[in-house]
Image (cartoon, grey):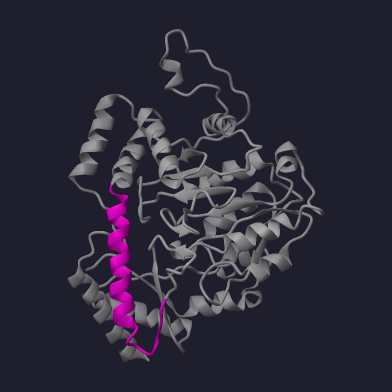
Amino acid sequence: MIPFSPPRIDEETVKEVTEALMSGWITTGPRTKQFEKEITAYVGCETTVCVNSWTNGMQVLLDWWGIGAGDEVILPAYTYCASGNVVLHSGAKLILVDIDSKDFNASVTAIEKAMSPRTKAIVPVDIGGFPCDYDEIIQLAEEMRSTFQPNNELQQKLGRPIVIADAAHSFGALYGGQRVGRVADITVFSFHAVKNLTTAEGGAICFQLPDSFDHETIYKEFCVKILHGQSKDALAKTKKGAWKYDVVEPGFKCNMTDIQAAIGLVELRRYPSNLKRRAEIFELYTTAFSKCNWAELPVYKTPLKESSYHLYQIRIRDIDGATRDAIVESVAERGVAVNVHFQPLPLLTAYKRRDFNISDYPIALERYSNEISLPVYYDLTDDQVNTVIDAVVLAVEELT
């Protein structure tokens, strides 16, 4: 069986993790701090805070920004449930919008129609690793300055809705020649096991707020917030006589460990070769499927944008969801694991119960109904890529 997205774990990873284990630092320590600095350098942002998951990082971020009851947060309907769940947990009103017909990302037109004086945040999602239309989205936020209603000093200082990139898929992607991570006001990455760069579980918050914000102060505030509101972490308490600490707020518990960071440091060192190989696999798929009149190929590189090559989302013309599901099963019977990304949120019970109706998001439904994600990862060989291609072609021709 060709798996869908196995992590790249080898002797180099094992060695780094073993050294972390034997060092005595298995929770937040020097490797986590080094990983944060190296992410900041790679992305080019002002500062980075590592956390134990994208979800918890985003939850802390919404809390820090003061988002809660009476506020509205705009999010595309086409995303994983984590994106919406954190907004619901914040107490804010979740505003879902449809996606653009040219890719799987939020429609700028739909975002504009959804905005109101209560909009506190816009959260574009880089589905598959392909960046959203950030220039247009940030411009929409700028146009809200005259009607924006801030709740606190942070919101007042920015003076408009904040743009937070859900970049769970797009570490290493490019927008206008810059890495995703320094394009939006704040960007949150995921380092889950199936992501391009993994720490098993984990994530990072990258800050690129205007110059009026003190990023060093923000970094210190977040280090407190992600450790129960405790004024010192374990590393700080190792100094002589420094055992005593305060709890300055009822914070969260989502700090990254040095074991996680050890994996991440290896992953980051070899990330350029990882991206290169993933791009090669995309090209192999595109060359093969461009010969098939039933295939609609994903957009992954334009003059403005370049994907992180996380998901190869092929679409099969003129089929419905039931046929797509049968094709997925047929491909699996041929020894290849494929996936579907994603079920739009209004299809899920938790969101139906909150009165979201998929009929309000026709493009999301249409694109979901015939989408299949193909395996893309560093260790996938050319022969295996050809096996994937053959399995998909045979399954489609058999069932359509």
Choose top left, top right, bottom left or bottom right for residue 153: top right
Q: Within the image, what quadrant is residue 14 found in?
A: top left
Please check the rendered image and state whether residue 291 is part of the magenta-colored stretch, yes or no: yes
Q: Say whether residue 396 is left or right of residue 157.
A: left
What are the residue bounds of the magenta stretch?
A: 270-297
Q: Residue at x 35, y 32 (%)?
A: 31
Q: Residue furthest right?
A: 147
**Quarter holding the C terminus?**
bottom left
Q: Is residue 115 magenta?
A: no
Q: Is residue 335 visible?
A: no
Nearer to the camera, 338 or 221: 221
**Residue 258 in picture, x, y percent from top left:** 36, 33
User: Does residue 92 appear in this view?
Assistant: yes
The residue depicted at 20 percent of the width and 37 percent of the height is 15
Residue ranking furthest to the top: 241
**Looking at the picture, how far across and down is residue 353, in whole percent?**
65, 65
Residue 315 position (above or below residue 198): below
Q: Please state the horizontal and vertical placement of residue 359, each as a whole percent of the image.
A: 64, 78
Where residue 311 appears, x then y in whole percent?
A: 39, 66
Q: Nearer the viewer, residue 294 or 334?
A: 294
